[in-house]
Image (cartoon, helix red, strand yellow):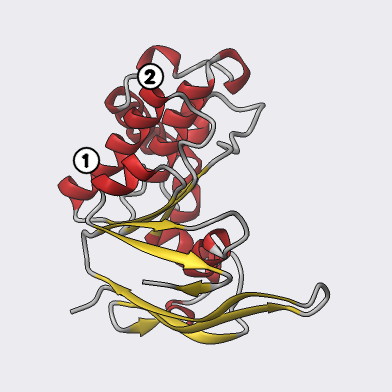
Amino acid sequence: MNFLMVDRLSKLYPKDNIEALKGVTFSVSEGEVVAVMGPSGCGKSTLLNMIGALDRPTSGDILVNGRPVKEYGPAHLFRARMIGFVFQFHHMVSGMTLAENVAAPLVAQGIGKHERMKRAMELLENVGLEHRAHFLPSRVSGGERQRAAVARALVATPKIILADEPTGNLDSSAGDAVFQLMLTHSRDKGATVIIATHNAEIAGLCDRTITMRDGCITN
């Protein structure tokens, strides 16, 4: 059974008269790691935003475990329970420590502070950042911030990880480390990973690649 189904998904931005997605259809199995490739502006980020319920499609549907996303309740609760995001720019809260940033997704699940911080510390240890746990983001390197961002995405054990150019601002060594963290989580927890990337080497390590151009899938 397909775990994630994108069905004839379209997105029109009327103000700018831009059709970012044009009837996109594909399916992904549980635990599958899929790369989405294509030139800038082809619709990769829009697609991930739709899957993660950060935006609504103009038409079409997204189903998870056979159920439309809208049936999972409010979008923020769907994201909190099902989705882990990793962005090109880490989006760390500057006034919070790495541990506090990593623990933040657990607040929406009603998990108490002690348990939140315990899980955050476990994840930071897994990504080799336990010694930076109480540092502010401005006091660590870009690679360390991005590893912390991956830990934040994984802390709630999401079933779907959406990664939008997560290695785009990193050197090859740091980029490989970030990708391997997501790959290991997928293998260990059976999570589905969709990663938008320009990096052909990373795409080659995924189970398969979807190629996009002008809002459409071309393969």
Q: Amino acid at mark 1?
A: Thr
Q: Which residue carries the number 2 mark? A: 129
> Mark 1 sits on what residue?
184
Mark nearer the N terminus (2 vs 1): 2
| Quarter of the rendering occupied by the C terminus | bottom left
- Residue that sits furthest to the right in the current view: 15
Residue plotted at (41% across, 47% down): 111
Q: Secondary structure at mark 1?
A: helix
Q: Give the image location of residue 65, x and y in percent.
A: 28, 77
Rendered location of residue 216, percent (x, y): 50, 75
Which numbered mark, 2 or 1, is in the foreground of this view?
1
Relative to the observer, which residue lies in front, 190 or 79?
Answer: 190
> Tag 2, which secondary structure?
loop
Q: Give the CA separation, mark 2 to mark 1.
A: 17 Å
Quarter of the image with the N terminus in it: bottom left
Where is residue 195 shown, x and y percent of the image? Answer: 40, 52
Is 124 placed left or right of 167 in the picture? left
Residue 114 visible within the image: yes
Q: Amino acid at mark 2?
A: Leu
User: What is the quadrant of residue 181 in the picture?
Assistant: top left
Does residue 178 lie above or below 138 as drawn? Answer: below
Image check: 109 left or right of 10? left
- Figure check: 88 above or below 131: below
Mark 2 is surrounded, within 10 Å at the Cα level, by few (under 14), some (14 to 19) or many (20 or more) other residues, namely many
Q: Nearer the viewer, residue 197 or 193?
A: 197
Q: Residue visible at 48% across and 77% down?
A: 73
State the image quarter where residue 45 is shown. Answer: bottom right
Q: Could you say where residue 104 lies in the image, as x and y percent from the top left?
A: 51, 41
The front one of 8 and 30 is 8
Q: Are marks 2 and 1 in contact (CB under 8 Å)?
A: no
Residue at 41% x, 64% y is 211
- Is residue 74 or residue 52 the one in the foreground? 52
